Image (cartoon, grey):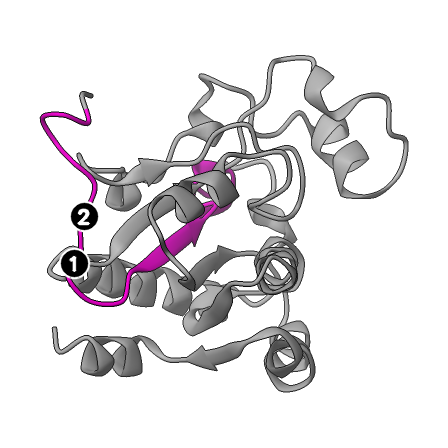
């Protein structure tokens, strides 16, 4: 798509971005290779519905919408030969391979013209190896809202990384989910306030008068 035909949003006020992290079928589809990690299915289902409402509302505002997925070559060469942690897990379970059903954005979260799709990401943080930071800086965006999966892994990593890069970070708490309610509670109660803040979808909508 040509950005000349569909320019990114330009706000006359303070520039903001809303980042949707990993709204891909590896998570969203029951056939996804990591969907089985979710233990609290109701929490996850509720977060998906809240995320749909969030995206619908954001598209009525002038906030810059960003889609931040993971996309790897078939042999996951981007991750090297790591034998531990998340990077090893991605290679072992062969997740997020470019062109496969699992790597595709969920139908309800397919990027539209003018919405930026992050590329080059190689780690848990949406900033790791990607063009997210350069895009935000080039657009003059300092305030970043984040939603997605999983709260206690990639969303938290993006929150921490964004804070350390100098962004004002906000988690949309009901548009994200962890594997369990205990994990979700821990992040929201004991982690978020060190690196930003959290609000609900309703508060986001009210704040932006959508």
Instruction: Say which residue label 1 marks.
Output: 62
Labelled pair 1, 2 in contact (Cβ < 8 Å) = yes
The answer to whether one can see residue 193 in this image is yes
Q: How far is the residue under mark 1 from the one under mark 2?
A: 6 Å
Q: Magenta segment range? A: 3-31
Res. 157 image quadrant: bottom right
Question: Label for residue 9?
Answer: 2
Relative image position of residue 206 (x, y in whole percent): 20, 83
The answer to whether one can see residue 76 in this image is no
Residue 87 sits above or below residue 10 on the image: above
Q: What is the tally of numbered marks visible in this picture?
A: 2
Q: Nearer the viewer, residue 12 or 154?
A: 12
The reply to whether the magenta stretch includes residue 46 is no
* Residue at left offset 18%, top offset 21%: 2
* Residue at left offset 83%, top offset 43%: 85
Task: Mark 2: give few (<14), some (14-19) or many (20+) Cα within 10 Å.
Answer: some
Q: Which of marks 1 and 2 is nearer the N terminus?
A: 2
Secondary structure mostly taken by the magenta-highlighted segment of the chain: loop
The reply to whether the magenta stretch includes residue 20 is yes
Relative image position of residue 48 (x, y in whole percent): 36, 60
Task: Mark 1: give few (<14), some (14-19) or many (20+) Cα within 10 Å.
Answer: some
Position of residue 167 in the picture relative to residue 174 (left or right): right
């Amino acid at each position: 798509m040509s950005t000349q035909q569909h320019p990114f949003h330009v706000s006359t006020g303070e520039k903001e971005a809303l980042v949707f992290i990993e709204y891909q079928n590896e998570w969203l589809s029951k056939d996804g290779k990591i969907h089985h990690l979710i233990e609290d299915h109701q929490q996850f289902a509720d977060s998906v519905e809240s995320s749909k409402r969030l995206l619908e509302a954001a598209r009525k505002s002038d906030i810059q919408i960003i889609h931040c997925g993971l996309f790897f070559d078939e042999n996951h060469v981007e991750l090297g030969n790591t034998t531990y942690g998340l990077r090893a897990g991605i290679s072992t379970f062969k997740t997020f391979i470019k062109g496969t059903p699992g790597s595709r954005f969920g139908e309800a979260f397919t990027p539209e013209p003018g919405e930026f799709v992050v590329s080059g990401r190689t780690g848990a943080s949406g900033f790791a190896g990607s063009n997210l930071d350069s895009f935000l800086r080039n657009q003059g965006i300092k305030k970043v809202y984040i939603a997605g999966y999983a709260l206690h892994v990639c969303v938290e990593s993006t929150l921490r990384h964004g804070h350390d890069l100098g962004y004002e970070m906000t988690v949309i708490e009901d548009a994200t989910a962890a594997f369990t309610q205990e994990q979700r509670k821990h992040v929201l109660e004991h982690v978020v306030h060190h690196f930003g803040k959290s609000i609900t979808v309703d508060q986001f909508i009210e704040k932006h008068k959508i």
